[in-house]
Image (tube, grey):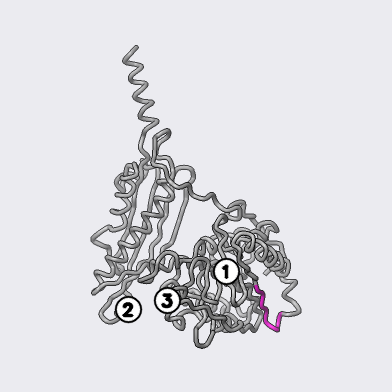
Amino acid sequence: MKKYFIFILALFWQGVFAQMSVSIHSKEYFFNSPGDVAYVANRLQGTLTKNGYRVLSSGDTAKSDYLIVIQANSRRGNNVNNLFFAFIDATLTITGKGQLNYTQEFSGIKGGSTDFSGANMKAYKTLATMISDTVSRILVSKPIAENRPVAMEKPALPPSDVDINIPLSQKVNSDVYVLAIGNEDYSNFQTGLNSEINVEAAANDAKVFSIYCIKTLGIPEKNVMLKTNATLGQMKQAIAKLITLAQIREGKASLIFYYSGHGLPDEETKEPYIMPVDVSGTDVKSAININALYKDLTKYPCKRITVILDACFSGGARNQGLLALKGVKVKPKEFSVTGNLLVMSSSSADESSSVYKEKQHGMFTYFLLKKIQSTKGNVSYKDLFDDVYNRVRLENVTINNKTQTPQLTGSPEIQSTWETWRLNDQ
Protein backbone atom coordinates (compact mmCIF):
# COMPACT_ATOMS: atom_id res chain seq x y z
CA MET A 1 0.00 0.00 0.00
CA LYS A 2 2.83 2.34 0.86
CA LYS A 3 4.53 1.63 -2.50
CA TYR A 4 1.35 2.52 -4.38
CA PHE A 5 1.04 5.72 -2.38
CA ILE A 6 4.63 6.73 -3.23
CA PHE A 7 4.05 5.90 -6.90
CA ILE A 8 0.89 8.01 -7.07
CA LEU A 9 2.62 10.84 -5.21
CA ALA A 10 5.49 10.72 -7.70
CA LEU A 11 3.08 11.00 -10.63
CA PHE A 12 1.32 13.90 -8.95
CA TRP A 13 4.63 15.64 -8.27
CA GLN A 14 5.72 15.29 -11.90
CA GLY A 15 2.41 16.64 -13.17
CA VAL A 16 2.40 19.67 -10.89
CA PHE A 17 6.02 20.64 -11.27
CA ALA A 18 6.66 19.56 -14.86
CA GLN A 19 8.64 22.09 -16.86
CA MET A 20 7.09 23.76 -19.85
CA SER A 21 9.02 22.94 -23.02
CA VAL A 22 9.98 25.15 -25.96
CA SER A 23 11.27 24.32 -29.41
CA ILE A 24 13.24 27.03 -31.25
CA HIS A 25 13.54 27.06 -35.04
CA SER A 26 15.88 29.82 -36.17
CA LYS A 27 17.04 30.71 -39.68
CA GLU A 28 19.63 33.45 -39.35
CA TYR A 29 21.05 34.57 -42.69
CA PHE A 30 24.07 36.81 -43.13
CA PHE A 31 23.69 38.87 -46.31
CA ASN A 32 21.40 36.22 -47.91
CA SER A 33 23.68 33.29 -46.95
CA PRO A 34 23.15 30.90 -44.00
CA GLY A 35 25.00 32.23 -40.95
CA ASP A 36 27.64 30.25 -39.10
CA VAL A 37 26.53 31.54 -35.66
CA ALA A 38 22.96 31.45 -34.34
CA TYR A 39 23.15 34.67 -32.29
CA VAL A 40 19.43 34.97 -31.67
CA ALA A 41 18.72 31.30 -30.97
CA ASN A 42 21.64 30.98 -28.54
CA ARG A 43 20.67 34.10 -26.61
CA LEU A 44 17.03 33.05 -26.49
CA GLN A 45 17.86 29.52 -25.33
CA GLY A 46 19.87 30.94 -22.44
CA THR A 47 17.06 33.31 -21.45
CA LEU A 48 14.41 30.58 -21.46
CA THR A 49 16.59 28.04 -19.63
CA LYS A 50 17.39 30.61 -16.96
CA ASN A 51 13.66 31.15 -16.44
CA GLY A 52 12.86 27.46 -15.99
CA TYR A 53 11.85 26.37 -19.48
CA ARG A 54 13.15 23.16 -21.06
CA VAL A 55 14.47 23.89 -24.56
CA LEU A 56 14.03 20.93 -26.91
CA SER A 57 15.90 20.22 -30.11
CA SER A 58 14.34 21.58 -33.28
CA GLY A 59 13.21 18.07 -34.21
CA ASP A 60 11.02 17.74 -31.12
CA THR A 61 8.34 20.19 -32.22
CA ALA A 62 5.50 17.77 -31.54
CA LYS A 63 6.60 17.36 -27.91
CA SER A 64 6.92 21.06 -27.12
CA ASP A 65 4.41 23.29 -25.38
CA TYR A 66 5.55 26.30 -27.39
CA LEU A 67 7.14 26.70 -30.81
CA ILE A 68 9.27 29.75 -31.55
CA VAL A 69 10.20 30.45 -35.18
CA ILE A 70 12.74 33.12 -36.07
CA GLN A 71 13.55 34.17 -39.62
CA ALA A 72 16.21 36.84 -40.05
CA ASN A 73 18.39 38.18 -42.84
CA SER A 74 20.96 40.96 -42.84
CA ARG A 75 21.78 43.39 -45.61
CA ARG A 76 24.69 45.71 -46.23
CA GLY A 77 24.19 49.41 -45.60
CA ASN A 78 26.38 52.41 -46.27
CA ASN A 79 30.06 52.96 -45.63
CA VAL A 80 30.48 56.38 -44.01
CA ASN A 81 34.05 57.46 -43.28
CA ASN A 82 35.16 53.82 -42.98
CA LEU A 83 32.27 53.01 -40.65
CA PHE A 84 30.26 50.16 -42.14
CA PHE A 85 26.59 49.55 -41.40
CA ALA A 86 24.43 46.44 -41.60
CA PHE A 87 20.66 46.11 -41.17
CA ILE A 88 18.53 43.11 -40.26
CA ASP A 89 14.89 42.39 -41.02
CA ALA A 90 13.35 39.60 -38.97
CA THR A 91 10.08 37.91 -38.10
CA LEU A 92 9.33 36.28 -34.75
CA THR A 93 6.41 33.84 -34.39
CA ILE A 94 5.33 32.17 -31.14
CA THR A 95 2.60 29.53 -31.08
CA GLY A 96 1.49 27.09 -28.41
CA LYS A 97 -0.66 26.50 -25.36
CA GLY A 98 -3.73 28.59 -24.68
CA GLN A 99 -4.18 29.22 -28.44
CA LEU A 100 -1.16 31.51 -28.38
CA ASN A 101 -0.41 32.83 -31.86
CA TYR A 102 1.89 35.86 -31.79
CA THR A 103 3.86 37.43 -34.64
CA GLN A 104 6.13 40.47 -34.62
CA GLU A 105 8.29 42.01 -37.31
CA PHE A 106 11.63 43.68 -36.64
CA SER A 107 12.70 46.01 -39.42
CA GLY A 108 16.04 47.63 -40.10
CA ILE A 109 17.87 46.61 -36.90
CA LYS A 110 21.16 48.47 -37.25
CA GLY A 111 24.78 47.65 -36.43
CA GLY A 112 27.93 49.60 -37.18
CA SER A 113 31.62 48.60 -37.18
CA THR A 114 34.90 48.88 -39.08
CA ASP A 115 33.77 46.20 -41.56
CA PHE A 116 30.53 44.58 -42.69
CA SER A 117 31.21 41.40 -40.71
CA GLY A 118 31.50 43.34 -37.46
CA ALA A 119 28.47 45.46 -38.31
CA ASN A 120 26.48 42.29 -38.99
CA MET A 121 27.50 40.82 -35.63
CA LYS A 122 26.47 43.97 -33.73
CA ALA A 123 23.15 44.13 -35.52
CA TYR A 124 22.45 40.47 -34.70
CA LYS A 125 23.36 40.98 -31.06
CA THR A 126 20.90 43.88 -30.87
CA LEU A 127 18.23 41.75 -32.53
CA ALA A 128 18.97 38.89 -30.10
CA THR A 129 18.35 41.21 -27.16
CA MET A 130 15.13 42.56 -28.65
CA ILE A 131 13.71 39.10 -29.43
CA SER A 132 14.74 37.69 -26.05
CA ASP A 133 13.03 40.60 -24.31
CA THR A 134 9.89 40.10 -26.41
CA VAL A 135 9.72 36.36 -25.73
CA SER A 136 10.31 36.99 -22.03
CA ARG A 137 7.35 39.38 -21.88
CA ILE A 138 5.12 36.78 -23.49
CA LEU A 139 6.30 33.47 -22.03
CA VAL A 140 8.22 34.20 -18.86
CA SER A 141 5.26 36.11 -17.47
CA LYS A 142 3.25 32.89 -17.81
CA PRO A 143 3.45 30.31 -14.99
CA ILE A 144 6.15 27.80 -15.92
CA ALA A 145 4.38 25.10 -13.95
CA GLU A 146 1.24 25.12 -11.89
CA ASN A 147 1.79 26.04 -8.25
CA ARG A 148 5.49 26.53 -8.88
CA PRO A 149 6.93 29.59 -7.13
CA VAL A 150 8.28 32.16 -9.58
CA ALA A 151 10.06 35.46 -9.11
CA MET A 152 7.75 38.41 -8.60
CA GLU A 153 7.53 40.63 -11.65
CA LYS A 154 5.87 43.92 -12.33
CA PRO A 155 2.46 42.97 -13.71
CA ALA A 156 1.87 43.81 -17.35
CA LEU A 157 -0.93 46.19 -18.16
CA PRO A 158 -4.04 44.43 -19.43
CA PRO A 159 -4.99 44.99 -23.08
CA SER A 160 -6.70 48.28 -23.75
CA ASP A 161 -10.47 48.16 -24.20
CA VAL A 162 -10.00 49.16 -27.86
CA ASP A 163 -7.54 46.32 -28.46
CA ILE A 164 -10.22 43.69 -27.79
CA ASN A 165 -13.84 43.22 -28.89
CA ILE A 166 -13.01 44.68 -32.30
CA PRO A 167 -16.22 44.71 -34.40
CA LEU A 168 -16.29 42.41 -37.40
CA SER A 169 -17.89 43.69 -40.61
CA GLN A 170 -19.41 41.57 -43.35
CA LYS A 171 -18.79 44.39 -45.80
CA VAL A 172 -15.83 44.26 -48.18
CA ASN A 173 -14.07 47.46 -49.27
CA SER A 174 -11.77 45.95 -51.87
CA ASP A 175 -10.91 49.30 -53.48
CA VAL A 176 -9.27 50.70 -50.33
CA TYR A 177 -5.50 50.51 -49.73
CA VAL A 178 -3.92 51.29 -46.37
CA LEU A 179 -0.42 52.10 -45.17
CA ALA A 180 -0.10 52.21 -41.36
CA ILE A 181 3.27 53.19 -39.84
CA GLY A 182 4.10 53.13 -36.14
CA ASN A 183 7.58 54.46 -35.36
CA GLU A 184 8.29 53.93 -31.68
CA ASP A 185 11.86 52.75 -31.14
CA TYR A 186 14.32 55.46 -32.22
CA SER A 187 16.99 54.74 -29.60
CA ASN A 188 17.90 51.34 -31.07
CA PHE A 189 18.51 52.81 -34.51
CA GLN A 190 20.55 55.87 -33.61
CA THR A 191 23.61 56.26 -31.41
CA GLY A 192 23.49 58.64 -28.48
CA LEU A 193 19.74 58.41 -27.87
CA ASN A 194 18.18 57.05 -24.70
CA SER A 195 14.82 55.30 -24.45
CA GLU A 196 13.12 58.52 -23.30
CA ILE A 197 13.31 59.70 -26.91
CA ASN A 198 11.08 56.83 -28.07
CA VAL A 199 7.40 57.37 -28.89
CA GLU A 200 5.52 55.30 -26.36
CA ALA A 201 2.78 53.04 -27.82
CA ALA A 202 3.30 54.19 -31.43
CA ALA A 203 3.81 50.63 -32.69
CA ASN A 204 0.65 49.49 -30.94
CA ASP A 205 -1.22 52.45 -32.45
CA ALA A 206 -0.40 51.35 -35.99
CA LYS A 207 -0.95 47.64 -35.33
CA VAL A 208 -4.40 48.06 -33.82
CA PHE A 209 -5.44 50.65 -36.41
CA SER A 210 -4.55 48.18 -39.17
CA ILE A 211 -6.64 45.48 -37.45
CA TYR A 212 -9.65 47.81 -37.39
CA CYS A 213 -9.13 48.49 -41.10
CA ILE A 214 -9.30 44.77 -41.83
CA LYS A 215 -11.96 43.61 -39.37
CA THR A 216 -14.25 46.60 -38.95
CA LEU A 217 -13.88 48.49 -42.23
CA GLY A 218 -13.79 45.33 -44.34
CA ILE A 219 -10.54 46.13 -46.15
CA PRO A 220 -8.86 42.94 -47.45
CA GLU A 221 -5.76 42.05 -45.46
CA LYS A 222 -3.67 42.00 -48.64
CA ASN A 223 -4.56 45.68 -49.13
CA VAL A 224 -3.17 46.72 -45.73
CA MET A 225 0.53 47.44 -45.26
CA LEU A 226 1.76 47.66 -41.65
CA LYS A 227 5.22 49.00 -40.84
CA THR A 228 6.56 49.32 -37.31
CA ASN A 229 9.87 51.02 -36.53
CA ALA A 230 10.29 51.79 -40.20
CA THR A 231 13.54 53.10 -41.63
CA LEU A 232 13.72 55.79 -44.31
CA GLY A 233 14.15 53.19 -47.05
CA GLN A 234 11.22 51.13 -45.82
CA MET A 235 8.94 54.15 -45.56
CA LYS A 236 9.83 55.36 -49.05
CA GLN A 237 9.29 51.88 -50.47
CA ALA A 238 5.88 51.49 -48.82
CA ILE A 239 4.73 54.97 -49.88
CA ALA A 240 5.85 54.28 -53.46
CA LYS A 241 3.80 51.06 -53.46
CA LEU A 242 0.71 52.92 -52.23
CA ILE A 243 1.10 55.49 -55.01
CA THR A 244 1.62 52.77 -57.62
CA LEU A 245 -1.61 51.08 -56.52
CA ALA A 246 -3.45 54.39 -57.01
CA GLN A 247 -1.95 54.70 -60.50
CA ILE A 248 -2.94 51.17 -61.50
CA ARG A 249 -6.55 51.54 -60.25
CA GLU A 250 -7.07 54.64 -62.43
CA GLY A 251 -9.33 56.62 -60.12
CA LYS A 252 -11.16 53.67 -58.51
CA ALA A 253 -9.00 53.44 -55.38
CA SER A 254 -9.27 55.10 -51.99
CA LEU A 255 -6.10 55.52 -49.90
CA ILE A 256 -5.64 55.66 -46.14
CA PHE A 257 -2.28 56.74 -44.75
CA TYR A 258 -1.84 56.43 -40.96
CA TYR A 259 1.27 57.50 -39.05
CA SER A 260 2.15 57.46 -35.36
CA GLY A 261 5.63 58.59 -34.35
CA HIS A 262 7.91 61.60 -34.24
CA GLY A 263 7.29 64.65 -36.40
CA LEU A 264 9.65 67.58 -36.75
CA PRO A 265 9.84 70.89 -38.60
CA ASP A 266 12.91 72.03 -40.45
CA GLU A 267 14.31 74.89 -38.36
CA GLU A 268 15.01 77.05 -41.40
CA THR A 269 12.08 76.46 -43.75
CA LYS A 270 9.55 75.41 -41.04
CA GLU A 271 8.48 72.59 -43.38
CA PRO A 272 6.99 69.63 -41.42
CA TYR A 273 8.47 66.13 -41.66
CA ILE A 274 7.61 62.69 -40.31
CA MET A 275 10.65 60.90 -38.97
CA PRO A 276 11.88 57.39 -39.86
CA VAL A 277 13.56 55.65 -36.93
CA ASP A 278 17.02 55.90 -38.52
CA VAL A 279 16.96 59.64 -39.34
CA SER A 280 18.42 62.03 -36.78
CA GLY A 281 16.68 65.15 -35.57
CA THR A 282 19.71 67.08 -36.81
CA ASP A 283 19.14 65.80 -40.37
CA VAL A 284 15.44 66.57 -40.80
CA LYS A 285 15.67 67.20 -44.54
CA SER A 286 16.48 63.50 -45.02
CA ALA A 287 13.10 62.51 -43.54
CA ILE A 288 9.65 62.42 -45.20
CA ASN A 289 8.42 65.91 -46.05
CA ILE A 290 4.70 66.08 -45.28
CA ASN A 291 3.78 68.45 -48.10
CA ALA A 292 5.77 66.38 -50.59
CA LEU A 293 3.94 63.29 -49.30
CA TYR A 294 0.58 64.96 -49.93
CA LYS A 295 1.61 65.81 -53.48
CA ASP A 296 2.67 62.21 -54.07
CA LEU A 297 -0.58 60.80 -52.64
CA THR A 298 -2.64 63.05 -54.94
CA LYS A 299 -0.48 62.46 -58.02
CA TYR A 300 -3.05 60.09 -59.50
CA PRO A 301 -6.85 60.33 -59.36
CA CYS A 302 -8.46 58.61 -56.34
CA LYS A 303 -12.00 58.46 -54.97
CA ARG A 304 -10.70 59.82 -51.69
CA ILE A 305 -7.47 60.02 -49.71
CA THR A 306 -7.46 60.03 -45.91
CA VAL A 307 -4.35 60.93 -43.89
CA ILE A 308 -4.32 60.38 -40.11
CA LEU A 309 -1.34 61.70 -38.16
CA ASP A 310 -0.77 60.99 -34.46
CA ALA A 311 2.35 63.13 -34.29
CA CYS A 312 3.29 66.69 -33.53
CA PHE A 313 5.58 68.89 -35.57
CA SER A 314 6.75 71.48 -33.05
CA GLY A 315 9.68 69.49 -31.66
CA GLY A 316 7.72 68.19 -28.68
CA ALA A 317 6.52 64.59 -28.35
CA ARG A 318 4.79 62.02 -26.14
CA ASN A 319 7.90 61.40 -24.06
CA GLN A 320 10.70 63.61 -25.28
CA GLY A 321 11.12 65.16 -28.71
CA LEU A 322 14.03 64.42 -31.02
CA LEU A 323 15.07 68.05 -30.56
CA ALA A 324 14.42 68.15 -26.82
CA LEU A 325 18.11 67.95 -26.04
CA LYS A 326 18.61 71.14 -28.05
CA GLY A 327 15.68 72.90 -26.41
CA VAL A 328 14.17 73.69 -29.80
CA LYS A 329 10.46 74.21 -30.40
CA VAL A 330 9.45 75.50 -33.83
CA LYS A 331 6.02 76.31 -35.18
CA PRO A 332 5.80 74.53 -38.53
CA LYS A 333 4.22 75.84 -41.71
CA GLU A 334 0.58 74.97 -42.29
CA PHE A 335 -0.06 71.86 -44.38
CA SER A 336 -0.78 72.44 -48.05
CA VAL A 337 -3.66 70.19 -49.18
CA THR A 338 -5.07 69.62 -52.68
CA GLY A 339 -7.06 66.92 -54.49
CA ASN A 340 -9.56 64.62 -52.76
CA LEU A 341 -7.44 64.73 -49.59
CA LEU A 342 -8.53 65.02 -45.96
CA VAL A 343 -6.07 65.19 -43.07
CA MET A 344 -6.86 64.45 -39.41
CA SER A 345 -3.95 65.35 -37.14
CA SER A 346 -3.59 64.90 -33.41
CA SER A 347 -2.66 68.42 -32.32
CA SER A 348 -2.27 72.01 -33.46
CA ALA A 349 0.98 73.37 -34.84
CA ASP A 350 2.47 74.53 -31.52
CA GLU A 351 1.21 71.68 -29.28
CA SER A 352 2.62 68.27 -28.42
CA SER A 353 0.68 65.03 -28.85
CA SER A 354 0.28 63.01 -25.67
CA VAL A 355 0.09 59.35 -24.74
CA TYR A 356 -2.77 57.73 -22.83
CA LYS A 357 -0.52 55.46 -20.77
CA GLU A 358 -3.30 53.43 -19.17
CA LYS A 359 -4.72 52.59 -22.60
CA GLN A 360 -1.31 51.98 -24.26
CA HIS A 361 -2.12 54.31 -27.16
CA GLY A 362 -1.63 57.86 -28.23
CA MET A 363 -4.43 60.00 -26.79
CA PHE A 364 -5.67 60.87 -30.29
CA THR A 365 -5.47 57.31 -31.62
CA TYR A 366 -7.23 55.87 -28.58
CA PHE A 367 -10.32 58.04 -29.01
CA LEU A 368 -10.23 57.53 -32.79
CA LEU A 369 -10.33 53.74 -32.29
CA LYS A 370 -12.93 54.08 -29.53
CA LYS A 371 -15.34 55.87 -31.86
CA ILE A 372 -14.77 53.34 -34.65
CA GLN A 373 -15.36 50.53 -32.15
CA SER A 374 -18.58 52.00 -30.72
CA THR A 375 -20.06 52.75 -34.18
CA LYS A 376 -18.70 49.57 -35.81
CA GLY A 377 -17.17 51.85 -38.41
CA ASN A 378 -20.54 53.15 -39.56
CA VAL A 379 -19.77 56.80 -38.90
CA SER A 380 -19.39 59.94 -40.98
CA TYR A 381 -16.03 61.67 -41.09
CA LYS A 382 -17.63 64.71 -39.46
CA ASP A 383 -19.09 62.77 -36.54
CA LEU A 384 -15.85 60.84 -36.12
CA PHE A 385 -13.69 63.94 -35.99
CA ASP A 386 -16.10 65.94 -33.81
CA ASP A 387 -16.14 63.16 -31.21
CA VAL A 388 -12.36 62.73 -31.22
CA TYR A 389 -11.83 66.50 -31.08
CA ASN A 390 -14.07 66.98 -28.04
CA ARG A 391 -12.82 63.97 -26.09
CA VAL A 392 -9.11 64.55 -26.70
CA ARG A 393 -9.36 68.21 -25.67
CA LEU A 394 -11.09 67.28 -22.41
CA GLU A 395 -9.31 64.09 -21.45
CA ASN A 396 -5.78 65.28 -22.21
CA VAL A 397 -6.18 68.17 -19.77
CA THR A 398 -7.76 65.84 -17.22
CA ILE A 399 -5.14 63.08 -17.53
CA ASN A 400 -1.95 64.81 -18.72
CA ASN A 401 -2.64 68.43 -17.71
CA LYS A 402 -1.84 69.58 -21.25
CA THR A 403 -3.89 71.11 -24.00
CA GLN A 404 -4.14 69.09 -27.19
CA THR A 405 -6.36 70.22 -30.04
CA PRO A 406 -6.86 67.82 -32.97
CA GLN A 407 -6.97 69.46 -36.39
CA LEU A 408 -8.84 68.68 -39.59
CA THR A 409 -7.72 70.00 -42.96
CA GLY A 410 -9.44 69.33 -46.27
CA SER A 411 -8.63 70.38 -49.78
CA PRO A 412 -10.84 73.01 -51.47
CA GLU A 413 -12.14 70.33 -53.84
CA ILE A 414 -13.93 68.46 -51.04
CA GLN A 415 -15.16 71.30 -48.82
CA SER A 416 -18.79 70.71 -49.75
CA THR A 417 -18.68 66.89 -49.64
CA TRP A 418 -16.30 65.58 -46.97
CA GLU A 419 -18.81 65.82 -44.11
CA THR A 420 -20.94 63.14 -45.74
CA TRP A 421 -18.07 60.71 -46.32
CA ARG A 422 -18.52 57.56 -44.27
CA LEU A 423 -15.63 55.59 -42.87
CA ASN A 424 -16.95 52.16 -43.80
CA ASP A 425 -18.05 53.27 -47.27
CA GLN A 426 -14.96 54.24 -49.21
Label 1 vs label 3, nearer the camera: 1
Above or below for 51 versus 77? above
Do callouts 3 and 2 mark residues in contact (Cβ within 8 Å)? no
Mark 1 and mark 3: Cα distance apart in space = 20 Å
Residue matched to label 3? 279
- The quadrant in which residue 212 appears is bottom right
Instruction: Please name the amino acid that badge 2 sits on.
Output: Asn
Quick one: 328 or 332, which is closer to the camera? 328
Residue matched to label 1? 353
Q: Start and end of the magenta stretch? A: 407-414
Label 3 vs label 2, nearer the camera: 3
Mark before the other along the chain sequence, 3 or 2? 2
- Is 113 left, or right, of 397 in this rendering? left
Q: Position of residue 210 (x, y in %)?
A: 56, 63
Q: Is residue 114 magenta?
A: no
Q: Is residue 167 visible?
A: yes
Q: Split into 4 quadrants, where in the image is the N terminus?
A: top left
Mark before the other along the chain sequence, 1 or 3? 3
Mark before the other along the chain sequence, 2 or 1? 2
